[in-house]
Image: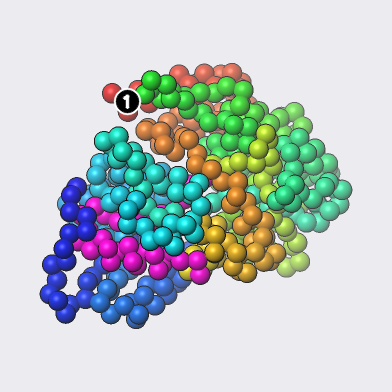
């Protein structure tokens, strides 16, 4: 650690050079990123930014190596859960006192909460600027929704989970189903929705974090399981599938409702057959409509020689107008309030109005602050929830696996 914002070592007339590691991968998104970098470079001859293409698949391993070797990029694109470890290892600059007032006030506090971590010495720091978020919505076949006579939910008046289950039951007929739950990767989806009932899955007492699966945590798990096995309104064919895998069956009307991340709208908009009419509905609500939030972030390396210039670039890159472009390119939600008010983000076309409105329900997910969460998710939660949703184990068995095997994992992170 050390020298964040050290004096520039370049000769007086030479431009400052900054490397920007971007993880954008969708065509529209990469284009938007590169366009903004070009725009910046034209307007700022003294601060030249180089766009470096990275990949979500290996970014954290790559960064570990670069941080250790002192070759990390100045500006780093990542997601909020990854920042926690890098912050406590001293690899990222605390931006708390560097954020321009306009940027700070444009992004609401719940989004800043996703990037606020302990620096390893008991102080809270801000280790990235959160700019894109994902929420869960329901993508619906409009014809089947209308035919069912179910009330159409709105962001101000979403379905309760009971209404959602009743609607799915109404839409189950003639060999077709009301809903599809692709559960190949069940953890993020179910944990983020579990906050609907206050389910946090972890608790901390006397500085020790343990796994918790009580009534609040079981609600969403049990309701999805009921749709599969009690109501039989959920399509069993989707169970082992990844997020986008059920789309061909969706277009054929095999099921009416597909709970998914907002970004899936892009594939539907691009691939749905001619004449297929679809709408975006808000996710259901329990005792609240809260969902867990993960943010995409831009951070500055602690060792950057040009931290102040890097911050100027970030402030430009993530201003309201530019966040609207980035969100549009990625089909995600901007954190910027100015961006969220942009007509591009509030149009009914492709469900942007409903998607953007869902951002107000996003809160920092407690599990993303847990040391060892990733290993718990991979080794314990994923296989256990897969077995539960496949009806191979009961909810009690699932709960005790999540807790007992989970605490063994967490133990190793708390010594």
Q: Quadrant of residue 406?
A: top left
Residue 136 falls inside the magenta stretch: no
Rendered view: 145 above or below 240: below
Apparent side of residue 197 relative to residue 179 in the rendered image (left or right):
left
At horizontal 78% and vertical 39% (from top left) the residue drawn is 163
Read off the magenta span. 293-321
Residue 320 falls inside the magenta stretch: yes
Question: Percent from the top left, x then y, of residue 29?
Answer: 47, 66
Count of numbered marks: 1
Apparent side of residue 269 relative to residue 49 in the rendered image (left or right):
right
Depth order, front residue of 344/315:
315
Rendered view: 20 above or below 56: below
User: Farthest front residue?
Assistant: 101
Secondary structure at badge 1 equals loop
At horizontal 83% and vertical 46% (from top left) the residue drawn is 150
At horizontal 51% and vertical 23% (from top left) the residue drawn is 212
Q: Is residue 38 visible?
A: no
Q: Which residue is mark 1?
A: 414
Rendered view: 43 above or below 113: below
């Amino acid at each position: 650690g050390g020298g964040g914002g050290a004096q520039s070592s370049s000769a007086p007339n030479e431009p400052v050079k900054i490397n920007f590691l971007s993880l954008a991968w969708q065509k529209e998104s990469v284009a938007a990123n590169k366009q903004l970098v070009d725009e910046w470079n034209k307007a700022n001859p003294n601060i030249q930014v180089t766009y470096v293409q990275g990949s979500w698949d290996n970014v954290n391993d790559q960064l570990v190596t670069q941080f250790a070797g002192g070759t990390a990029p100045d500006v780093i694109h990542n997601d909020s859960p990854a920042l926690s470890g890098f912050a406590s290892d001293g690899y990222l600059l605390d931006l708390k006192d560097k954020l321009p007032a306009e940027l700070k006030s444009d992004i609401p506090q719940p989004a800043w909460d996703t990037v606020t971590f302990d620096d390893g010495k008991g102080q809270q720091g801000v280790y990235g600027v959160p700019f894109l978020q994902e929420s869960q919505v329901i993508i619906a076949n409009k014809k089947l929704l209308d035919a069912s006579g179910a009330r159409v939910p709105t962001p101000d008046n979403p379905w309760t989970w009971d209404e959602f289950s009743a609607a799915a039951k109404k839409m189950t007929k003639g060999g077709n189903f009301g809903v599809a739950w692709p559960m190949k990767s069940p953890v993020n989806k179910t944990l983020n929705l579990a906050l609907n009932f206050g389910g946090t899955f972890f608790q901390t007492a006397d500085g020790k974090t343990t796994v918790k699966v009580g009534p609040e945590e079981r609600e969403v798990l049990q309701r999805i399981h009921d749709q599969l096995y009690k109501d039989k309104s959920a399509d069993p064919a989707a169970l082992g599938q990844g997020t986008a895998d059920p789309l061909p069956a969706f277009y054929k009307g095999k099921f009416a409702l597909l709970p998914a991340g907002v970004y899936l709208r892009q594939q539907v908009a691009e691939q749905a057959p001619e004449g297929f009419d679809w709408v975006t509905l808000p996710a259901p609500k329990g005792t609240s409509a809260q969902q867990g939030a993960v943010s995409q972030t831009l951070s500055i390396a602690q060792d950057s020689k040009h931290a102040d210039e890097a911050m100027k670039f970030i402030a430009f890159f993530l201003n309201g107008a530019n966040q609207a472009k980035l969100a549009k390119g990625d089909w995600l939600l901007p954190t910027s309030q100015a961006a969220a008010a942009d007509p591009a983000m509030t149009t009914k076309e492709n469900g942007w109005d409903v998607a953007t409105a869902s951002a107000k329900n996003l809160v920092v997910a407690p599990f993303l602050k847990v040391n060892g969460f990733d290993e718990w998710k991979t080794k314990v939660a994923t296989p256990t929830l897969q077995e539960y949703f496949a009806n191979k184990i009961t909810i009690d068995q699932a709960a005790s696996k999540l807790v007992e095997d989970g605490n063994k994992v967490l133990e190793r992170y708390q010594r």
